[in-house]
Image (cartoon, rainbow, N blue to C red):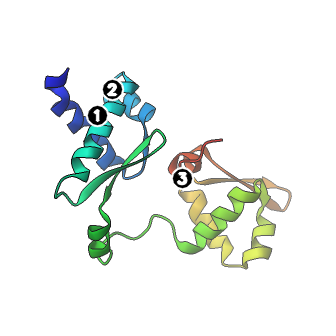
């Protein structure tokens, strides 16, 4: 299999690039056609070492069994002015953090805590499918979704 490692490295690297977020080894296995999680780990570790010792602006970062393709710090600083906007606004992120810490939480309690602007933040994070909002009486019950847990790499 060593002769084909270049092909497998390209597959793993392409997946990490396309995801733009940490990927678990099992997730790479499920989507890459490479059935051995151990082999994927070996490939990811080899890529991590290669990028660490190269002049490439990229590096492979990993935590537990999740790997991510990121910019090396010196390049991240240089590109911050042209990098895309974050996927979620700062206000929505604060509301989302509150919901995740206190879930399930009622929308009326969020409005009390954050003010009227929270309606827009709730709408944003519902549209991005990070939370569900189920009608309960005159308000809504807010809870995080599986997408939220996967996006923020939260294991329960």
* Viewer-side residue, 4 vs 112: 4
- Is 137 situated left or right of 110 in this image? right
Residue in view at x 30 percent, y 61 percent = 71
The first of marks 1 and 3 along the sequence is 1
In the picture, residue 85 is in which quadrant? bottom left
**Residue 9 in the image: x percent, y percent?**
23, 36
Label 3: which residue?
152
Label 1 crowding class (10 Å Cα cut-off): few <14, some 14-19, many 20+? Answer: many
Residue in view at x 60 percent, y 58 percent = 126
- Measured along the vertical axis of the image, is residue 36 above or below residue 44? above
The C terminus: image quadrant:
top right
**Residue 24 in the image: x percent, y percent?**
45, 38
The N terminus: image quadrant:
top left
Label 2: which residue?
39
Kind of element beneath mark 3: loop
Residue in view at x 26 percent, y 52 percent = 52
């Amino acid at each position: 299999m060593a002769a084909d490692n270049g092909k497998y490295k390209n597959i793993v690297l392409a997946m990490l690039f396309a995801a733009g977020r940490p990927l678990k080894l099992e997730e790479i296995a499920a989507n890459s056609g490479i059935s051995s999680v151990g082999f994927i780990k070996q490939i990811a570790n080899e890529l991590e070492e290669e990028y660490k010792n190269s002049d490439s602006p990229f590096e492979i970062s990993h935590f537990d069994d999740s790997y991510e393709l990121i910019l090396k710090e010196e390049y991240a600083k240089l590109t911050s002015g042209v990098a895309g906007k974050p996927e979620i606004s700062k206000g929505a992120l604060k509301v989302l953090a509150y919901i995740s810490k206190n879930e399930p939480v009622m929308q009326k309690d969020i409005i009390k805590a954050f003010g009227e602007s929270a309606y827009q933040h709730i709408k944003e994070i519902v549209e991005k499918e990070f939370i569900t909002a189920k009608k309960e009486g005159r308000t809504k019950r807010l809870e995080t979704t599986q997408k939220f847990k996967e996006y923020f790499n939260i294991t329960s």
